[in-house]
Amino acid sequence: MVDFRKLYSIFVDEAAEKIAELESGLLQLEKSPDDKELLNTIFRAAHTIKGSSGTIGLKDISHFTHGMEEILDLMRQDRLTPDNELVSVLLEAADLIREMVECVASEAAFEFSRCEAVTQRMEAVKKHRSEAVPAAGPDQVKKESQDTAADLRHVMIKFVPNADLFKRGIDPAIILNDIRGLGEVVTIHAFTDTVPPLSDINPENLYMRWDIHLKTSKSDAEIRKVFEFVEEGSDIKILPIAVASATDLPFIGQLLVGEGSVKAEDVEDALKSQKRLGEILLEKGKITSKDLEKAVEKQNQKKTESLRNAISSTIRVDLKKLDHLINTVGEMVIIHSMFQQLLQNGSERTAEGIEALFSQLQRIGRDIQESAMALRMLPVGEVFHRFTRLVRELSISKGKNIELVISGEDTELDKGVLEKITDPLVHLIRNAIDHGIETPDERAAQGKPPQGTIHLSAYQMGDAVYIEIEDDGKGLSKERILKKAQVMGMLGNDTDLTDEQIYNLIFLPGLSTADQVTDISGRGVGMDVVKKNIESLNGKVQIRSKPGMGTTISIKLPLTLAIIDGLTVLIGNEPFIIPITMVIESLRPEQKDIKTLNERGEVINIRGEYIPLVRLYRLLGLMPQQENPWEAIVIVTTYEGRKYGLLVDELIGQQQIVIKHLGTAMPRVRDIAGGTILGNGKVALVLDIPGIVELSRQQ
Amino acid sequence: MSKMVLIVDDSASMRQLVSFALKDAGYEVIEAANGKDAISKLGSAKVEMVITDLNMPEMDGISFIKQLRNTPGCKFTPVLMLTTESQESKKQEGKQAGASGWLVKPFTPEQLVETVRKFVK
Amino acid sequence: MTEAAAVKRVEEQMEGGRQYVTFCLNEELYAIEALVVQEIIELGAITKVPHLPDFFKGVINLRGTIIPVVDLKMKFAMHSGEYKKHTCVIVTEFSGGTIGLIVDAVSDVLSLANEDISDTPSFGAHITTDFMKGMSRMDGNLAIILDIEKVLSEADTASLSAIRNMDNIKAAEPAR
């Protein structure tokens, strides 16, 4: 005989809770009979009692509760009105269930004949009252009940399953089926664009992805529950959609169906057969490769628009960084308990022990700070490699042959910066494909290799990260830019511009070099927005171009929130940080090495080389500890190939620091790159050496 | 014909409880006391789904799942692990071995049936 | 008062009534909308930032974030002496970002209906009427309600033009 007791106790606890919900819900319902959400709660409570009692073999309880559930369901459908009489019957029923459950708990027998009177009354209510409502067709009733049941909303579920789903014994068809149980599935679109060429197909892998448009009253969490076991490694997004814009992207299947090249059933069919072979439509002979190509092309155009969304929503963190952080935190916990122990068993050696522990704690604190900051720094490769596909697909659709070469993918950027730079990069790469690189024929005619190249590179130099997009296309046309700018009235009569100034005109709003706005790059957003986005990151963008040779766009991004090695110095009594990458050497000059030259101002002789001396205290408006350079320290730095000597009062030391922005409300000051927080909690400013040098030159 | 589920657990009462709940929901159930036992039973019946405990003598759940995945005809069979909350690492291990899902002990029969239905209709 | 009028008044308070934080600048009472106030903190160490107008006192560390602070008294060209024990920083959010306002003391948070606020007089106060939203009587004292958006955007533009001019200025003289 099966031992139910363990199950019973679980059921009893759960049922008691549900009965309480049922009871308080019914009492409230009397006051607010129109509260649909309340009604749903009551219904769910009854439904749970029915379900769980049935599962563990308490059929009588299940049966009785079923009668109650039916009435509640009719109420949800507005076919019964919860008046006093109805509520009292239901409350009586709830009382009976409570007694039944108590009997289960105490292993006593319940006299189920006692239920009859209430059951009859419930039956009577169901029969008479619900008939009073004009009978509607079953379909219609169902639809109504859905629409009124709760707030029905439309969501787009984007489901990109992990390729190894089959290998874990999970059938996506069941998941899709479960979604049908959540509400009304308006559309399911299967994407085959992720299916590799036949030769690369592993029949045990799942290559498809789905977009499901669902009309439901369920919460995101409830929807997500369907994906419980597939969540890991899969990409599942639940996006609310406005009904009017229910059509998302034109999907391959949809496009093909729309063009009459394939029947909807065939798309579904392909979806089903995926499990066995990962088949593609093409292979079934339902469409020609041309049809497919056409559809792919159309889809590509749309897809690039959604590329940035995919990038910005998630970014991965290297597990090693995370593990390191967690390990360090673990160490800290150990030290905390050691501290406690030490303090409890105090002895004459306590002070010594505390000191040792404290220095360990200090080390760990620094370590944690560093690793936490490092979490925000991500390699640009994450974003760069996503462009490979963009370039491939866009160039095919434009009839061009373009290779994307990536370098410097290990260069790290702050997550926030990386996210915001993605959008401008998409536009710049599109521009290079669309306007920059010529068709293979055009290239051949000019003696260039038919395959064009876009070189996307990143590197760190000084306290900035540079990202460059270089193409070997036709370059910008100065004449065309000038003509456009004149036509649009942006120039006036001033045509005396340098090449660089002319190229930079393309950052003006509304100026596009292509005579015709194309599908790919010319829609809406232009170079002016690109420039604005980059500048909002405190970055700079520059264009270099050579006719017939290509165009290079160089983006300079500051290392906001970056960790740098800094040299702490005192100017007057204020500490300042100089990025160590800018420092060549530091020295105390001799009096005879300081000279004042008429044309160059103060200079300092370092091993026969005269370099300009910049008195930082003067530039920053501070009172120095001493004015004589031979009593102070000179830090030698280099900018644009020339050396400069920066005069400071004292060297404090070298340490890693986190550069922070001074806040958006702070006006930008040219010689300050940012701030950092010192051990004592005070802010120290980080000097911007290029800014300082430029300012000093103007003096 | 009803679908066949194999429950693998060294605790006889646990097997019986799972078995009862599933039979009540219309499944057929066969039982095995450990991984070795289970592998031998897999050959003799068409099993649509496997539910397995992780801590078992003879062959534990993880090794069992690994072996199952290499058994002809069982490559795509859904496997549900029964775990306790404290075994998060075990859960990961199981998933890597090829488990389809998990159920945290203690669970109600309703939860069990609901979960099984996710894999076998 | 008729019942209808009473209801109307309550509604006005619900809709039009707003919370204000009041503070002192040299014994004068000022108020800003509580909505823009993020928190009020003690005045800690300030790091001076070069080239900015005097009222831009510098930057402070707000739990790991660096924010600029402005001395409101200097901004309004009032006498600003040493900072004392009660001197505190009202951290506010405005369209330009987060900024700290140095004030003598924060006195109260209270609710004012729109009708409690009268128009700005064109005389008397230390500050230009552009910065004011109005005036209100609070516990017998007259409080000037500041339009923080105007005060700060003005602060911003002033300093920005200072920066622009900076390119042309000669070496600044030592501040002390």
Image (spheres, grey):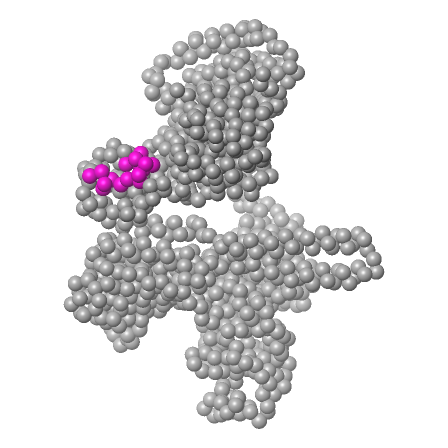
Q: Residue at x 59, y 72 (%)?
A: A654
Residue A451 in percent (x, y) is at 23, 63
Choose between C142 and A401: the one closer to the eye: A401
Magenta extent: A270-285
Q: Is any part of residue B104 visible from this angle?
A: no
Q: Is residue A278 magenta?
A: yes
Q: Is residue A573 above or below residue A305?
A: below
Q: In what quadrant of the picture does the N terminus of chain A appear?
A: top right
Choose between B112 and A332: the one closer to the eye: B112
Residue A375 in percent (x, y) is at 52, 56
Please indicate whether residue A152 sits to the left or right of residue A352 in the image. left
Q: Is residue A193 above or below residue B58?
A: below
Residue farthest right in this picture: A348
* Count of marks placed on residues: 0
Magenta segment, prevailing SS (helix, strand or loop): helix
Choose between C107 and A50: the one closer to the eye: A50
Q: Is residue C71 magenta?
A: no
Q: Residue at x 36, y 13 (%)?
A: A134
Please indicate whether residue A365 sits to the left or right of residue A434 in the image. right
Q: Is any part of residue A274 visible from this angle?
A: yes
Residue A385 in percent (x, y) is at 37, 57
Q: Is residue B30 above or below residue C51?
A: above
Please indicate whether residue A98 sits to the left or right of residue B48 in the image. right
Q: Quadrant of residue A401?
A: bottom left
Q: Is residue A530 above or below residue A146?
A: below
Choose between A161 and C43: the one closer to the eye: A161
Q: Residue at x 45, y 22 (%)?
A: B27
Residue A682 in percent (x, y) is at 63, 65
Q: Residue at x 39, y 27 (%)?
A: A147
